[in-house]
Image: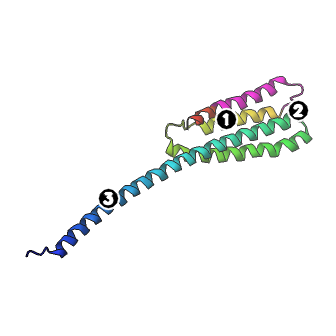
């Protein structure tokens, strides 16, 4: 009678199962890492889009206050100044979110935050004028808002 060497058979099967388990575990790790990176990429894009919408809303809020109080005087400036400060705070959040999104979406144009800041500065100039008599200032503020919204259309591709 030839008795098989069970120790050698068990060791061979065990080694095979360990190797197979290692391959499966490595595949699961690669899948988890890929899924995590994809989720992170989407999260950064969503944060950037959200920050851009927040900035757009802050500009709209400031424009609404100025429309309600079109004259350039102490009362209107008292209401507009905090709203304009919110614009800059929103721009700062947008700038940070944009930089983070750009790490995962390198095709985004790097100059978008600085162009947005330029439009905000143009918008600020219109706030120091009387919109009840100066239709050009009112129109210029609308153009600055439109330029910003157009600039942010690049984010829609994220």
User: Mark 2 vs mark 1: which is more N-terminal?
Assistant: 2
Taking the view exactly as shown, the residue that stands out farthest to the front is 1
Q: Is residue 39 magenta?
A: no
Give the Cα distance between marks 1 and 3.
Answer: 54 Å
Question: Can you tell which of label 2 and label 1 is closer to the viewer?
Answer: 2
| Mark 2 vs mark 1, CA separation in Å | 23 Å
Vertically, is 134 above or below 9?
above
The image quarter containing residue 116 is top right
Residue at 84% in and 41% down: 80
Q: Could you tell me which quadrant the N terminus lies in?
A: bottom left
Range of residues picked out in magenta? 129-150
Disc 3: which residue: 23
Residue in the image at 70% along x and 29% along y: 146
Q: Is residue 72 left or right of residue 93?
A: right
Q: How far separated are the C-alphas under marks 3 and 2?
A: 70 Å
Residue 34, given in percent of the width and then of the height, sits at: 44, 50
Would you say residue 99 is visible in this rendering? no
Of discs 3 and 2, which sits in the foreground?
3
Vertical position of residue 157 compared to residue 98: above or below: above
Residue 79: give its label. none
Rate crowding at label 2 as few (under 14), some (14 to 19) or many (20 or more) other CA atoms within 10 Å. many
Question: What residue would you read off at disc 1?
Answer: 118
Secondary structure under tag 2 reads loop
For this rendering, which residue is in front, 93 or 105?
A: 105
Instruction: Tell me which label, 3 or 2, sits earlier in the chain.
Output: 3
Q: Residues within 10 Å of mark 3 (few under 14, many from 20)?
A: few
Q: Residue at x 72, y 36 (%)?
A: 121
Q: Which mark is residue 70?
A: 2
Tell whether label 1 touches label 2 (CB within 8 Å): no
Please identify the quarter of the rendering in which residue 57 is found.
top right
């Amino acid at each position: 009678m030839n008795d098989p060497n069970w120790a050698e058979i068990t060791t061979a099967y065990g080694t095979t199962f360990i190797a197979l388990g290692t391959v499966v575990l490595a595949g699961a790790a690669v899948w988890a890492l890929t899924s995590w990176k994809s989720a992170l990429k989407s999260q950064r894009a969503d944060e950037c889009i959200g920050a851009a919408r927040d900035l757009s809303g802050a500009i709209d809020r400031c424009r609404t206050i100025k429309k309600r109080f079109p004259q350039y005087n102490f009362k209107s400036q008292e209401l507009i100044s905090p709203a304009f400060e919110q614009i800059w705070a929103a721009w700062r959040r947008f700038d940070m979110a944009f930089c983070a999104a750009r790490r995962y979406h390198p095709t985004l144009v790097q100059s978008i935050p600085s162009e947005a800041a330029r439009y905000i500065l143009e918008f600020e100039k219109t706030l120091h004028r009387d919109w009840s008599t100066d239709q050009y200032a009112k129109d210029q503020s609308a153009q600055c808002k439109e330029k910003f919204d157009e600039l942010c259309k690049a984010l829609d591709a994220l």
